[in-house]
């Protein structure tokens, strides 16, 4: 006996529902991992930190007063010492906040770092490496800031 010429072709409803369910489960498991790995957040924050390190160096060189740049897991800030007469103190506490910014929630900082830019020499001390996500910012002894 011959098969009818109008044989049904395609998928049954059960097969379609099963396929859609499997695809939805795979998407639900993998999508959050793809979103969490956001290299753009790391790059953006690293660029902002590098720009503000350069800004701290420029403020120190322009004003002739030391600037302390601190970065930790809450964010970064730049500070100067208090005023002594018409100029800044050469020693003492860092009291005047120049600027600050919080760390984005999806960026991981390697370790807290502190960099002091002097008003006369640019920076004193060895090179400092700041790890932001998978990127490393290097502040040279001369005050030069390098970002990969």
Image (cartoon, grey):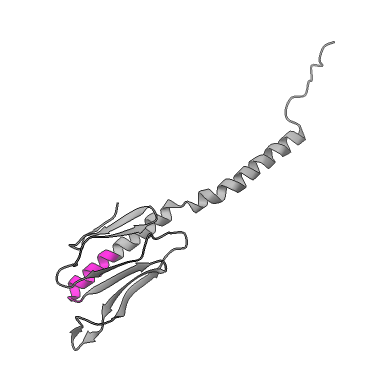
Quadrant of the rendered structure where residue 60 is? bottom left
Q: In which quadrant will I find the N terminus?
A: top right
Q: Is residue 69 magenta?
A: no
Work out whether 16 lies above or below 27. Answer: above
Of 30 and 3, nearer the camera is: 30
Majority secondary structure of magenta residues: helix
Which residue is most to the bottom?
Answer: 85
Name the residue rendered at 24%, 70% in the picture. Answer: 116
Quadrant of the rendered structure where residue 88 is? bottom left
Total numbered labels: 0
Give how far across and how far down residue 147 sits, in percent: 29, 55
Name the residue rendered at 64%, 40% in the picture. Answer: 23
- Span highlighted in magenta in the image: 53-65
Quadrant of the rendered structure where residue 64 is? bottom left
Name the residue rendered at 60%, 47% in the picture. Answer: 29
Give how far across and how far down residue 114 sits, in percent: 30, 68
């Amino acid at each position: 006996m011959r098969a009818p010429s109008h044989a049904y072709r395609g998928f049954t409803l059960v097969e379609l529902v099963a396929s859609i369910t499997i695809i939805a489960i795979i998407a639900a498991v993998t999508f959050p991992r793809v979103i969490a790995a956001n290299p753009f957040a790391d790059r953006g924050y690293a660029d902002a930190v590098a720009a503000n390190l350069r800004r701290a160096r420029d403020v120190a060189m322009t004003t002739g007063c030391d600037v302390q740049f601190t970065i930790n897991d809450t964010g970064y800030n730049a500070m100067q010492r208090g005023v002594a007469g018409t100029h800044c103190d050469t020693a003492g506490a860092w009291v005047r906040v120049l600027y600050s910014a919080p760390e984005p929630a999806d960026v991981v900082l390697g370790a807290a770092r502190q960099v002091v830019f002097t008003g006369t020499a640019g920076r004193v001390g060895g090179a400092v490496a700041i790890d932001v996500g998978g990127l490393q910012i290097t502040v040279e002894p001369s005050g030069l800031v390098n970002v990969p």
